[in-house]
Image (cartoon, rainbow, N blue to C red):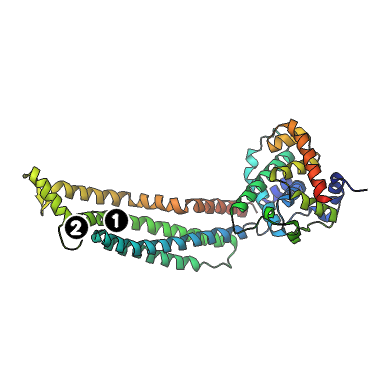
Amino acid sequence: MSSDFYTVSILPYSGIIIKICRAYTNSQEDFEDYYQEVCLQIWRSKDNFKEQSEWSTWIYRLSLNVCLTLLKKKKNNKQHNTLDYLPPEAMEDSRAFSDESLNQLYDAIRQLSEIDRGVILLYLEEKSYQEIADIIGTNANNIGVRIKRIKERLKKILA
Amino acid sequence: MEKSIETIWKEGFLKNDALIAPKLNDLYNQKSIDIVDKFRRMYKINIIGLVLFAVIILPVNIAVKIPYMGIPMFFIFLFIAFFALKFKNKLDKIDKNLNSYQYLKSFDDWTKEMIQFNTKFSRFLYPFVFLSLFAGFWFGGFGGNIPGQDFVNYLLEGNPDMLLVFGTPLFIILGLIFGVAFFAYFGGRIGKWDLNLGYGRILRRLDTLLTDMEELRASN
């Protein structure tokens, strides 16, 4: 990967990647691995970008797909314990942000199903229902209901 | 009043430290070590499998009265395990202190050498296995009747004019020659196919990783 490509095409969107990778990992080490893998996949797949969507939307989609794939691989690998099998109190390494409320919100998001994590991240990033549906690959009609349900669940966890 | 999740999100990411991207150095280090370690584990299991197979096939073949197959198979599989062990020792000597690219390149050189040896060796291995199988069923157990000879006698009863070479029907000798030639000719390919079944996936990953790294080096 050329440093130019990284600086011009990835770094300005690194916030998106960071936000997504944080939701699918519970340690700094895993986060860095996921981040690197997403960047690598963006670089490898850059020729597949057809400009039918915005570059940022494409990055959202690719980042989510990479994280879901890595999480699936990790689950299959019995040597590793995934977050899904860890109680929240065991996530001592997940204090990634100086803002404690944000840490708590991320802890709560990590307790959601893998797809719900993606949906709520996109919602919080102020993506439209149609965009969320396009990225996740579902029907826009269901997104509103789903987001409502996820927000209720998050409120319960955070309470 | 409790903050909404939207507010927590917005305010949290306003802080400077929230979105610091990790550095992309050492991108390939862990990948390189992982891929070689995985291969090493698989190779070790393979060697243990070869030794176990050799140790098991000998008594089993003696028990089912085909020792002339079991004995050569025992030696040939031990022989393969011996060479595999020598290759493993070479693999263990690859210096982990090299940088990722050199480390993977050394591993790649090792795999090429191993594949080359395996391909050449397979040209002898498969004809040898074929002959061992034939010998097992032809000569049968120690002492007693020789099944191959019984078979020849049976054929001669129906066809007394059959052409024999050293007491063996010509068509069997030709079949043997054809079998040996076939496995000698295709042995290398069978060996590669066999290797690909076990290690193909990991070797393809190695290729991809090396290509990426070479591109990375070229573009820097």
The chain containing the residue under callout 2 comes to: B
Q: Name the residue that disc number 2 marks.
A: B139
* Residue at the right extreme, as displayed: B1
Query: Label 1: few (<14), some or many (≥20) within 10 Å?
Result: some
Left or right: where does residue B145 sit relative to residue B105?
left
Say which element carries label 2. Answer: helix
Viewer-proximal residue, A53 or A157? A157
The mark nearer the N terminus, 2 or 1, is: 1
Q: What's the residue type where badge 1 is placed? A: Val
- Image quadrant in which you'd find residue A94: bottom right
Say which element carries label 1. Answer: helix
Q: Residue at x 77, y 53 (%)?
A: A107
* Residue at the left extreme, as displayed: B161
Residue B202 seen anywhere in this rendered image of the structure = yes
Q: Name the residue that disc number 1 marks.
A: B129
Q: Residue at x 70, y 57 (%)?
A: A86
Q: What's the residue type where badge 2 is placed? A: Phe
**Could you tell me residue A111's position as x and y percent?**
74, 50
